[in-house]
C-alpha cells in the first residue's frame, strides 16, 4: 500500500463542491490500486480573508511544504478584487514552490459536443505548457498619483534566460514523451514585444537544436488563437508565457466542449517542493451552491496528480471512468448539455471506478 499526504485547498465558490467530489473518486481509485490518501483540508480563501485580512496564513508555504501534493479548487469572490484573491492565494503557491511548468491537456472526448463542426472524438488532442512563475504575472510595477488625473500605472513582464530555457525544454521533453506528432509550437507576440518575446523566440530556436527529432513551429498569439479554431487537430504541444498560456487554455477548453473538463497541473519538476493540481476553471459565483458544477476537470486534475505521484494505473482508471461517463452521455452536468447534478456525476464516476477492469 502506497500512502500520500495531500493538502486540499478547496478555496472559493464551486471549488468546495468539485474538490469534495473529486476526493471521492480518488479514494475509490486508491482502493482499487492499493493507494491510500491522507487528506488534510486547509480552509483558505476569501472567507478566510474576511476573518483574517489575508487569503492564507503568513506561514502557509511552511504548512504545505511537507505534503506530497496540493489539490486545489478555485479562487475568486465577487466581493473582492480578483487580483487580491489570486495574488493572495494561488500565485504565491505557484511561485513559492517553483511550480514552473503548468501542464494543461485539451482533448475532445467521445460523447462531448464541441462547438467546432466536423471534429471527431480524439481528433483534438494537444497539451498547452504554460510558464507559471514569471512573465506577465511577475507582479513588478506600481501606481503613482492614485486616483488623481495624473495617475500612472506601470506593470512589467519578466523573462529570464533561466525561466525561459527551462519551460521550453519542458515543452520539448513533453513532445518527445507523448511521442504523438513530435511537434512543439511556441506562441509569442514578438512583433509587438520586441525585447522579451523576441528573446523567447531566440531561446526557442537555440534549444530546438538539441531536439532534432521534434518538429517546431512559432506562432504569434493572435494567429495561434485563429489556428486553434481552424486546425486544432494539427497541434501536439504548445509552449507559451504565463499570460498567453492562461488565455490559450480557456480557448482550448472551449473548443473541447467545456471549461468543466479542463485540468491543470502546476509542476515543480525537480520535486523539491510539492506540485499542485487544480481545474482550469475559477470559482463560478453564478452557479455556486446550486449543485450543478461539473466536477470532471478536478477529477482529471486528480488523475494528473496520481500520475505525477507515480501511480499511472490509478491515474488511468480515473481518466477511463470519466471518459466512460462522458461517452455514455446519460449523466452530464448542464455545461455539457445535461441536467444532472455534481453529486449524480460523481456517483456515476465512482461506480465506474469500482466496476472497470484494470
Ligand atoms: N482553479 C483555478 C482558479 O481558480 N483559477 C482562477 C484564476 O483566475 N486563475 C488565473 C490563472 O490561473 O492565471
Image (cartoon, helix red, strand yellow):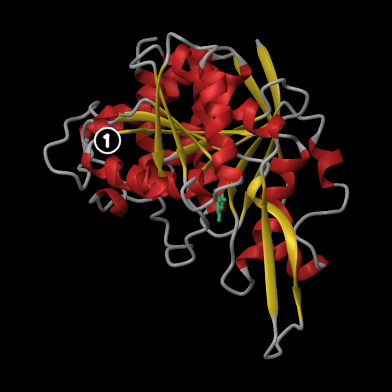
Above or below for 156 versus 326: below
x, y percent for residue 183? 38, 21
x, y percent for residue 165? 63, 27
Image quarter hosting the C terminus? top left
- Image quadrant where residue 199 sits: top right
- Image quadrant where residue 48 sits: bottom right
Query: Residue at the spot x=29%, y=27% of the render?
Result: 324
In the image as oriented, which residue stretches furthest toward the left? Answer: 118
| Closer-to-camera residue (40/280) | 280
| Closer-to-camera residue (303/237) | 237
Mark 1 is surrounded, within 10 Å at the Cα level, by few (under 14), some (14 to 19) or many (20 or more) other residues, namely many
Above or below for 172 versus 302: above
x, y percent for residue 27? 55, 27
Q: Mark 1 points at which residue?
A: 232
Number of residue marks: 1
Residue 262 at least partly seen: yes
Above or below for 129 versus 283: above
Residue 257 at least partly seen: no
- Image quadrant where residue 55 sits: bottom right
Amino acid at each position: 500500500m502506497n500512502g500520500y499526504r495531500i493538502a486540499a485547498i478547496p478555496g472559493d465558490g464551486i471549488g468546495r463542491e468539485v474538490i469534495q467530489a473529486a476526493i471521492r473518486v480518488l479514494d475509490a481509485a486508491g482502493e482499487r490500486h492499493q493507494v491510500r490518501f491522507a487528506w488534510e483540508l486547509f480552509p483558505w480563501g476569501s472567507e478566510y480573508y474576511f476573518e483574517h485580512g489575508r487569503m492564507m496564513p503568513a506561514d502557509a508555504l511552511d504548512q504545505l511544504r511537507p505534503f506530497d501534493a496540493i489539490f486545489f479548487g478555485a479562487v475568486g469572490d465577487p466581493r473582492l478584487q480578483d487580483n487580491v484573491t489570486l495574488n493572495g492565494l494561488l500565485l504565491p503557491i505557484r511561485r513559492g514552490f517553483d511550480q514552473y511548468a503548468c501542464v494543461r491537456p485539451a482533448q475532445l472526448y467521445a460523447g462531448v459536443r464541441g462547438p467546432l463542426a466536423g471534429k471527431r472524438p480524439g481528433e483534438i488532442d494537444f497539451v498547452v505548457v504554460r510558464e507559471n512563475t514569471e512573465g506577465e504575472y511577475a507582479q513588478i510595477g506600481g501606481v503613482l498619483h492614485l486616483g488623481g488625473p495624473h495617475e500612472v500605472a506601470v506593470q512589467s513582464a519578466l523573462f529570464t534566460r533561466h525561466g525561459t530555457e527551462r519551460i521550453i525544454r519542458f515543452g520539448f521533453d513533453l513532445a518527445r514523451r507523448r511521442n504523438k506528432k513530435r511537434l512543439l509550437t511556441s506562441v509569442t507576440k514578438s512583433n509587438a514585444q520586441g525585447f522579451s518575446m523576441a528573446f523567447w523566440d531566440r531561446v526557442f530556436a537555440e534549444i530546438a537544436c538539441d531536439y532534432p527529432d521534434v518538429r517546431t513551429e512559432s506562432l504569434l498569439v493572435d494567429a495561434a488563437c485563429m489556428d486553434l479554431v481552424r486546425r486544432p487537430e494539427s497541434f501536439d504541444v504548445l509552449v507559451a508565457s504565463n499570460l498567453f498560456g492562461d488565455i490559450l487554455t480557456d480557448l482550448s477548453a472551449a473548443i473541447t466542449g467545456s471549461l468543466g473538463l479542463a485540468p491543470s497541473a502546476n509542476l515543480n519538476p525537480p520535486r523539491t517542493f510539492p506540485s499542485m493540481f487544480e481545474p482550469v476553471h475559477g470559482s463560478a459565483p453564478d452557479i455556486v451552491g446550486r449543485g450543478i458544477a461539473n466536477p470532471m476537470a478536478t477529477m482529471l486534475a486528480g488523475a494528473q496528480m496520481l500520475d505525477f505521484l507515480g501511480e499511472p494505473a490509478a491515474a488511468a482508471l480515473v481518466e477511463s471512468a470519466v471518459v466512460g461517463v462522458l461517452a455514455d452521455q446519460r449523466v452530464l452536468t448542464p455545461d455539457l448539455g445535461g441536467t444532472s447534478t455534481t453529486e449524480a456525476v460523481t456517483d456515476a464516476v465512482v461506480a465506474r471506478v469500482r466496476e472497470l477492469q484494470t
